Image: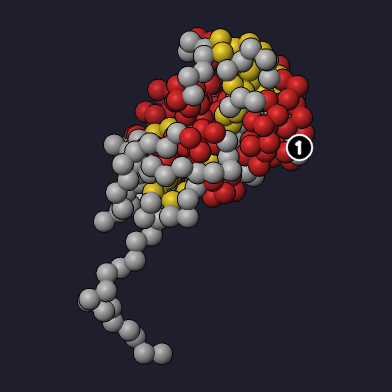
Amino acid sequence: MKSRTLNPQRPLQQLAAGGRIGVIALATDFNIEQDLRRIYPADVEPFTSRVRNYNPLTIENLRRMEPGISAAADSILPGTRLDAMIYACTSGTVAIGIERITELVQQSCPGVPVTNPVTAAFAAFAALRATRISILTPYTEAVNQEVASFFQRSGYEVLNIAGFGFEDDTAMSYIDPQDIAHAAAETCNPRADLLFISCTALRASLVLDQIEQTLGKPVVSSNQALAWHSLQLAGYPAPVRGFGRLLADHPTGSWQPHL
């Protein structure tokens, strides 16, 4: 086969021109990449590395992820500019802390904006003017107590929290979306400004519009909030339909294509 030379009049194609998002996913998460690719516009791409996590899901085991976060960040497209980095674990962020997560990621990716499901959720709550929330999770009661306390210390009134009681992170992705929708309808307090569905492994994105229609109020899920907030950090302003009011009604940013 003859070798081909580049046409000097034709520039190289831009790849992921709308946004390059690094994603540090848990080793056992079946769902995060599927959700992000489902939600992101076609010109935005997630690039994933994984960090080792441990079952059963307890606050102590969640903290055991901390030493692997910087190395996971370092392995995502080294030498290539990223528009944002995601640490994709809600309960892990509660266990390790928002500031520590950001510090660990920026040790490997200095200057790159960092988000996580908790930071993204707080930004979503502000956009939706929500201060009173109900929370649905797949976690045990012990982990739920830590999550609720964290949100309350951060200034939100947690009216109630309910969980499916799972200790196995792998199994959380197997919860049927219609079971999530049913639990959401049962969990959300009528006084809540919105319902927050926690955990990147849950396939909640498939039923967000359905749940919002049932409840008559906004619903924020971990992956929906991550997609929305990372698009903000990348400066991508276009709305995204089909995944709740947050993405449809609150686009922000001033997008410029990659050079």
Read off the residue under disc 1. Answer: 178
Residue 169 seen by the camera: no
Q: Quadrant of the N terminus?
A: bottom left
Residue 211 % position (x, y): 68, 32
Residue 105 % position (x, y): 39, 35
Mark 1 surroundings: few (<14), some (14-19) or many (≥20) residues within 10 A: some
Q: Secondary structure at mark 1?
A: helix
Residue found at x 48% / y 13%: 154
Residue 119 % position (x, y): 46, 26
Residue found at x 58% / y 31%: 221
Report whether 72 appears left or right of 170: left
Three-letter code for the amino acid on which mark 1 is drawn: Gln
Residue furthest to the bottom: 1
241, 166: nearer the viewer: 241
Residue found at x 36% / y 90%: 2
Residue 51 % position (x, y): 53, 39
Residue 193 seen by the camera: yes
24, 236: nearer the viewer: 236
Q: Quadrant of residue 61?
A: top right
Q: Is residue 160 above or below residue 113?
A: above
Residue furthest to the left: 8
Report whether 114 appears left or right of 27: left
Residue found at x 65% / y 25%: 216
255, 138: nearer the viewer: 255
